[in-house]
Image (cartoon, grey):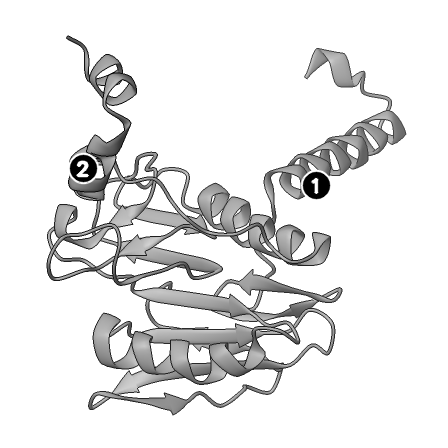
Amino acid sequence: MMITQALESQPNILEDISEEIIFPPSDLYSDEPPVETELHLEQIMLLIKSLKWLWKERTDFYAVGNLSIYYSPNQKKSEYFRGPDFFVVLGTERKTRKSWVVWEENGKYPNFIIEILSPTTARTDRGTKKELYQDIFRTPEYFLFDPYTLEFAGFYLIHGKYQPVELNEKGHLWSEELGLYLGIFQGLLRYFTPEGTLVPTPEESAEMEAEKSKRLAAKLRELNIDPDTI
């Protein structure tokens, strides 16, 4: 008899079967609620796609948003899980996952976390989550950003405690884990290179290449050179 048939014929059997048997540890799905606003979603997607585009040649990281991290010492889906708005794990395989299961990932926790603040989550992000990431996850860097008020702050884990990071003269914060600055550009949190250049999205890169080609073609026409012959 198939498992589904057994469950249908004996509905009470579910009361005696643990969630971990139905959902084995290696196949845990994320259990996070939808993001609160369209702006929150836009910000999370921007962080993901611009970093993946910048690191398109790398295979040693995992960057994702609004995904559950399961960290139960008893290896149970039903206890101890949390879903940061955005996080990056370094030194791991770059592949698609249904969730981040610590005990299935060699005990690894995120190296870098960003929480996108809102009126309903700000207190938790500044308090409970900050303590969790500091004391349990031991995440080296934790950043906070409010896309409506533009509040922006960062913390480094130093001697086991989060210490605030100071903004540089451009209003950017340095991430040692990512090797990038983070700063506000046109109302959203963006990455900047160590030299201070904005890290583009794939779409922005395509636009820049198109504009570069357009300028080159115009210059060639000024020199009476047919661009199609180059």
Q: Amino acid at mark 1?
A: Met
Q: Amino acid at mark 2?
A: Ser
**Can you tell which of label 2 and label 1 is closer to the viewer?**
2
Q: Residues within 10 Å of mark 2 (few under 14, many from 20)?
A: some
Q: Position of residue 167 (x, y in %)?
A: 54, 87
At a point 39% along the width and 49% down the height, the residue shown is 63
Residue 223 x, y percent position in the rendering: 84, 28
- The image quadrant that residue 139 belongs to is bottom left
Q: CA distance from mark 2 to mark 1?
A: 42 Å
Mark 1 or mark 2, which is nearer the start of the sequence? 2
Vertical order, 71 against 176 (above or below): above
Res 195 visible: no
- Label drawn at residue 208: 1
Instruction: Using the image, tell me which numbered label, if any, was put on residue 26.
Output: 2
Does 179 appear above or below 28?
below
Picture quadrant of residue 1: top left
Residue 170 versus residue 18 in the image, above or below? below
| Numbered label attached to residue 149 | none
Q: Quadrant of residue 47?
A: bottom right
| Towards the viewer: 142 or 19 | 19
x 28%, y 27%: residue: 11
